[in-house]
Image (spheres, rainbow, N blue to C red):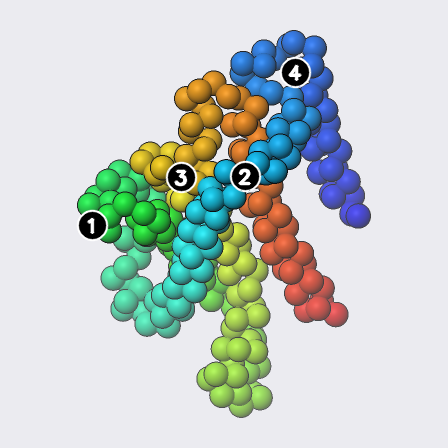
Amino acid sequence: MSKAGWIRTILLVGAVGALELACRTGAIAPTMVTAPSKMVTTLVETLRSDEIGMHLQHTLSAVAIAMSIAIVGGFVIGFVLNWVPFLRRAFSPFLAAYYAIPHFAFYPLLIVIFGLGPVPLIVLATLFAMVAMILATMAGLDRVPRVLLKTARIHRLSLVEEIWRVRLPAAAPHILSGLKLAVAYSFIGVIAGEFILSTSGIGHEIAFAYDNFDNPRMYALILFVLGIVTLFNMMVFAWERRMLRRRGA
């Protein structure tokens, strides 16, 4: 492990240990935050229960669909906007101001249009996540070094070969950053939507635990969501590091 990795690990372990100590000694009241060890044990008990399976399936399936649409659609749209300058000039002001829009205010309207069920959640999460992927794709393609494009022309690569062998590998770090944001935003869109009107899902269970002052279950489910997003981002980060090492070699 690198020095930076050791520093991150020490800081994380120290923060968790300090929180555990503060909760166990009563410096932080259990009505505010439960101890990390209690979160873990409650999470294990919750995952073993029978009713949680339906909520997990509801949330994770909606997140997977929204994430897939956002990543693929965002990449394609970002590529097209980068390739067609007049379209980019037309859409750039909307993209720049996109995240100033309160997306969750449209959730009741989406329910009117699509009805109750997972579709409004998927649409909301997709709208929230896709633009991050569009912007990351455009930023990555904008930063392809010109010397690589000249090298591709010298070697007489076709357009498809230039895109596949030169542009996309050079833009990969930015595209992967957009992918990580799209994953996080997909979870935010689905779970936040479940807070509002959904009758199932992890977000609904967190809100239900909050309303009933069930802090251990609430924090356990929050820990579960954080764990899934962190694990996925670590996998993408490891893939990114591997690509960079191969490029360096």
Dot 2 amino acid type: Asp
Residue at the extreme bottom of the image, as rendered? 156
Describe residue 235's horizontal placement relative to residue 209 as left or right.
right
- Disc 1 crowd rating (10 Å Cα; few below 14, some 14-19, many 20+) is few
Q: CA distance from mark 4 to mark 1?
A: 46 Å
Say what amino acid the circle numbered 1 marks.
Ile
Which residue is more in the foreground, 200 or 156? 200
In the image, residue 195 lies at what x, y percent?
38, 34
Across the whole image, how many numbered discs are drawn on residues?
A: 4
Residue 2 position in % (x across, y down): 78, 47
Which disc is residue 113 wearing? Answer: 1
Asked if labels 1 and 2 touch by Cβ distance under 8 angstroms, the answer is: no
Q: Contact (CB < 8 A) between labels 3 and 4?
A: no
Gap in Å between the C-alphas at discs 3 and 4?
31 Å
Nearer-N-terminus badge (4/1): 4
Q: Mark 3 or 4 closer to N-term?
A: 4
Indicate the quadrant containing the C terminus: top left, top right, bottom left or bottom right.
bottom right
Nearest the eye: 27 or 200: 200
Residue beneath disc 3: 200
Q: Give the structural element (helix, strand or loop) at label 2.
A: loop
Query: Image height check: is 32 above or below 220?
Result: above
